Structures are given as C-alpha cells and as structure tokens.
Image (cartoon, rainbow, N blue to C red):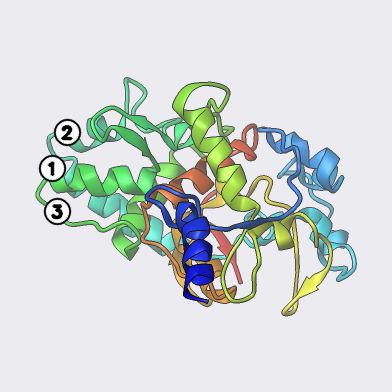
Amino acid sequence: MRKTCLIALLALAPLFAHGAEPYREYDLAETYEPHVSGDMRLSGSYRHWANPGNLDWRMAGNPDENWKLNWKFMDPPFNSAVHGGHFAMDRGELLFKELNLKGRFAKCLGAGKGGLKGLRARYPMYRADLKRIAGLEEVIESCAAREGRVLQNGSYDNSAVSLFVAGRSNGMPIRIDVGKGVMRDAFERGRTLFHTRAGKLNLACSSCHTHQIGLQLRGTVITTPYGDAAHYPVYRTKYFLQSLHLRFIECNLDTRVQPLMPGSRAYTDLEVFLTGLTNGYPVSVPSERD
C-alpha cells in the first residue's frame, strides 16, 4: 500500500514542480478583431451604436432592444444633466494644475507639443521608465510621486485626474497598436484571461460578455465588450467614480474571484485587450452608469 502511494505521488510530482501551470478551465474563445467594428461579427449590434451622435432613443426605452445599444445610451448626450462625473473632472483639473506648476507632470504623462490633446487615446502604452505597459492611472500615480504627491491608483483623486486628462481627448478615436511587440503579447494574454474560468462560480469574463449577450443577469442585460474602454473612468451612481481596474475588481467580487490590486499585470493585460476592442471609438467622458 505504501509503495503504491509513493508511486502515485512520484507520478504527480511534475504537476507541483516549480513553474508548473495550475489547472485552468477556459471558455470557447472567440476570434476578436482588435477594432470596435469587430462587434459586427460577435452580436451585430455595432451598427446601432457606431455613431454616438446618432443613437435611436426608441431602442433605449425598449427593454427588449436597449442591450443592442451596448449601454452607450447611458452616456452623454443621452443624459446631459450635471452628475458626479462633472464634479470629478473639476477636481481633476484642480489637481492637475497643482501638479503641473512647472510643466513636468504633463511631460511625464507623455504630453507633447499639442498638450494633453489625444493623450488618452494612446493609453495603455509601453513606458520605458516603468519598463512595462501601463494604463493612464498607473502613470498618473508614478508621475505624481515625482512631484511629491500620493495619488494611489484606484483612488478618487487619481481617477479624477485621469478623467480630466481624458476629457482633453473627447471625440478622438482610441488608437493603440496591438499588432506587434509587447502590446500584442499583452493583448493575447488579456484575451486568454478574458476566457479563463475562475472563482467559486467558475465563470470567465466571456461567460457573460460573449456567450450570454442579450440575456438578463441580475436585472441587467448583458452586452458585448466592445467600445467600453472609451468611457472610463466612469461615474457610477452606486459606486461613485470608477476606473477600469476598479470595474475589474467589482466583477471579480460579483463572481467570487479573488480581486487584484489596481495596476496589477493581469488587470493591465485585460485593459490592453478591452482597449484594443475599442480602437476606432471616440473617447467620451464624463460618462454615467448605474
């Protein structure tokens, strides 16, 4: 008996060796096109929300069809009233001016001769100073630290600065190159994570946002992952100001998955993936969601 157990343990030993991959389950992977128009193949809903300025409001008021707008109707100009996102943008402008008194903060963020215009549309990007790909909020934290300020990634003030910076690119299409090099590698890692099942409910992002599109989940109709990155940070009426990484944390908690810290490599890979699926769609902030 002891000999049999020993043989069994020796057979399993390679599985527990250093560097061995843990067991994972994956959803059936879709062939995502790294451009927002790829939604034409996934759900066919892209034609309904491709032009943010020409949405069919009748669909927004129809419970059976509103999912086809991919919740884009929740953003301005559908709701042009002042909401918490506007106040956050004002706070971000104040903080930005304080940090940029000598012009170093904007330069650190990557602003060129055109100032902040178009900057948000190029994030996430590879940062040589950080020696890794980083989202805008992570870079804000790093650049603020150089000015002697603590703006932790995921905090209200960090997201407020991000919102202000993003506002200088309103209407400009997201353009990140995920076709080569480290950005392509991150996009592919993000794609894999998107389809990886995890947690007590054994769900992946794609379990809902690919394979259950148009169905209801906890009173919400599930939509595609295309185009969403252009609207972050977003004002959530229940969760205040939310960066994209905080949204990942919320989804992890809802699906009983151990969340990670904002700025983690896994979350950044997911950000690259989702931003790649937003290529071509214009930055639209401040936005509001339930």
Query: Residue at image x 58%, y 65%?
Result: 198
Q: Position of residue 155 (x, y in %)?
A: 32, 63
Q: Amino acid at mark 2?
A: Arg
Pick the residue in front: 70 or 181. Answer: 181
In the depicted view, which residue is nearer to us: 200 or 208? 200
Q: CA distance from mark 2 to mark 3?
A: 13 Å
Circle 1: element type: helix
Residue 268 position (above or below residue 254): above
Does label 2 or label 1 sit earlier along the sequence?
Answer: 2
Contact, mark 2 vs mark 1 (Cβ under 8 Å) = yes
Please provide percent x and percent y for residue 170.
52, 40
Q: Residue at x 87, y 61 (%)?
A: 58
Where's residue 281, x and y in %? 64, 37
Q: Nearer the viewer, residue 166 or 45?
A: 45
Residue 56 at least partly seen: yes
The span from disc 2 to disc 1 (Cα, nearest Å) is: 9 Å
Count the marks.
3
Q: Residues within 10 Å of mark 2 (few under 14, many from 20)?
A: some
Q: Quadrant of residue 102?
A: top left
For the residue marked with disc 3, what is the amino acid? Arg
Q: Which residue is mark 2?
A: 104
Query: SS class of the residue under badge 3?
Result: loop
